Image (tube, rainbow, N blue to C red):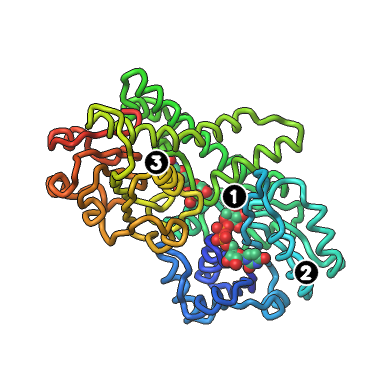
Amino acid sequence: MTITVIGAGYVGLVTAAVFSELGNKVYCVDISEERVNSLKKGKVPFFEPQLPEYLKRNIEEKRLFFTTSYSESVPKSQIVFICVGTPPTNNGEADLSYLFSAVEESARNFKGYTLITIKSTVPIGYEDDLEAIVKKYAKNNFEFAASPEFLKEGTAIEDTMHPDRIVIGTNSQKAQKMLLELHAPISGERIICDMRSAQLIKYASNAFLATKISYVNALAILCENMGADVGKVLSGVGADKRIGNAFMKPGVGYGGSCLPKDVTAFIAQADSFNYDFQLLRSVDAVNNTQIERFINKIRKALDAQEGKRTNLDGLTIAILGLAFKPNTDDIRDAPSIKIIKHLLDLKAKIVAYDPQTNENMKKVLPQVSYMEDAYKALQKADAMVLVTEWSEFSQMDFEKIKKIMKKPIIIDGRNMFDREKLKSLGFSYTGVGR
Ligand code: UDX
Ligand code: UDX
């Protein structure tokens, strides 16, 4: 098949890479000329394992093309995938302006039957608006489908090649057939449904994942108050097959480009469909208080060491890990940004290191000193604060760290380190829910 993918972000590029890898001819369209030009040379604008190799191979095999021109690609395509961003507006709803303009630009260029398949996360209820936009340019020779993706940054290619499920949302038999054919080489359960149900599957999945995390973060607080160990509690809870132990790690709260925005957008949608989604309001509220709790934790650890209320003015805090999670250079809604801003307000000096995001962070928080490795960041630091659990931090040389830090204080926001070992080396250790 010949297909067009609109939007060369995480979702669009991974979609284009995978479908070209499977032998289709794929055009990937993006409004950013700079992005398209560097992609043509095989340069990926962000860090995502395996993606550069996939892109390079398929560009060389002449199955994958990048362009800013809809007219170069859409007329040749049977399917157009819409993968532009749907960022949050100030009131938490999804901003659909990119979606509408991508659909409009596509429709101007339809030639023959075209199936518009929405992969972007789009709220329910805009089908008529989308249809009206296309009808301005094309009569009846088009159909819509929704086929949300569930890729996680860091394992995006793997998640797309071997997904748990493929959701195909359309009432048209023809569209179903085309999408089933396109996905034929990919394993995973097929969920065939109407468009609204497909879109709801995406929001409901992300909101459920967020709920799981807020639940374990709330449990972690209770464990601290009660003197229990959240790790043990969650192993016991997760051993129940109905619950499972995936996505059950307590930490500094969920971040990233999807979970926070999809939870607030889902609450807003529920409101407009006459349901006050109180459960999700609480999920969001628990997440929003995580940062402040974590700052208090850092302060408490410093106070305990000094035996008095510490003033952070003049203290150096080393932050390890800045990306919203490991194996990505994405800092959208990264908890690290909020944590650092709080600490800067308290006049602490911040030194930081992340294996992938130092450059991205410099643009957002230029006041921070970024180091090229963890040991350089820890040199003469008054405390180490672990925010993102990159695997390279797990086996650091803590004897060396004890010697180079000014004070042996570790606040571990992800329960990554061996608490007993650190205590035996003379560190003051604070985790989450332990
Ligand atoms: C995706 C989905 O599209 C979003 O709905 C979902 O909720 C999160 O994941 P992502 O791929 O991460 O978003 O988006 P982003 O990395 O912001 O990339 C979007 C791309 O679309 C950018 O390269 C941008 O230049 C391009 N774009 C945007 C267009 O080509 N046309 C537009 O009109 C707007
Ligand atoms: C998420 C969904 O998992 C994916 O299916 C969807 O398509 C896009 O949104 P992503 O944002 O890449 O993917 O990251 P994810 O691995 O889900 O992590 C989200 C946030 O939750 C991160 O900040 C992470 O640190 C946090 N998290 C995750 C926890 O705090 N605990 C966990 O157990 C898992």
Distance from the alpha carbon under mark 1 to that under mark 3: 52 Å
Q: How crowded is mark 3: few (under 14 residues within 10 Å), some or many (20 or more)?
A: some
Q: Position of residue 426 (x, y in %)?
A: 14, 35
> In 3D space, how far apart are the residues under numbered discs 2 and 3 (Cα atoms)?
52 Å
Badge 2 marks a residue whose secondary structure is: helix
Amino acid type of the residue tagged 3 in the rendering? Leu
Q: Can residue 164 be seen in this view?
A: no
The picture places residue 369, in percent across and down from the top left corner, at 33, 57
Three-letter code, disc 1: Arg
**Closer to the eye: label 1 or 3:** 3
Please report whichever mark, 2 or 3, sits nearer to the chain's N-terminal start: 2
Residue occupied by mark 2: 107
Q: Return the disc, 1 or 3, that comes first in the chain's sequence.
A: 1
Q: Position of residue 278 (x, y in %)?
A: 63, 28
Give the residue number, with chain letter if any, for mark 1: 190
Left or right, 324 with reference to 86? left
Quarter of image, res 311: top left
- The residue that disc 3 covers is 346
Q: Earlier in the sequence, mark 2 or mark 1?
A: 2
Mark 1 crowd level (few <14, some 14–19, many ≥20, 10 Å Cα) = few
**Relative side of 166 to 385, left or right:** right
Picture residue at 23% right of the left edge, 50% below the top? 378
* Depth check, front residue: 104 or 264: 264
Q: Do the residues labelled 1 and 3 touch (CB within 8 Å)?
A: no
Quarter placement of the N terminus: bottom right
Question: From this viewpoint, which residue is outermost toward the top?
Answer: 226
How many numbered badges does the structure rendering display? 3
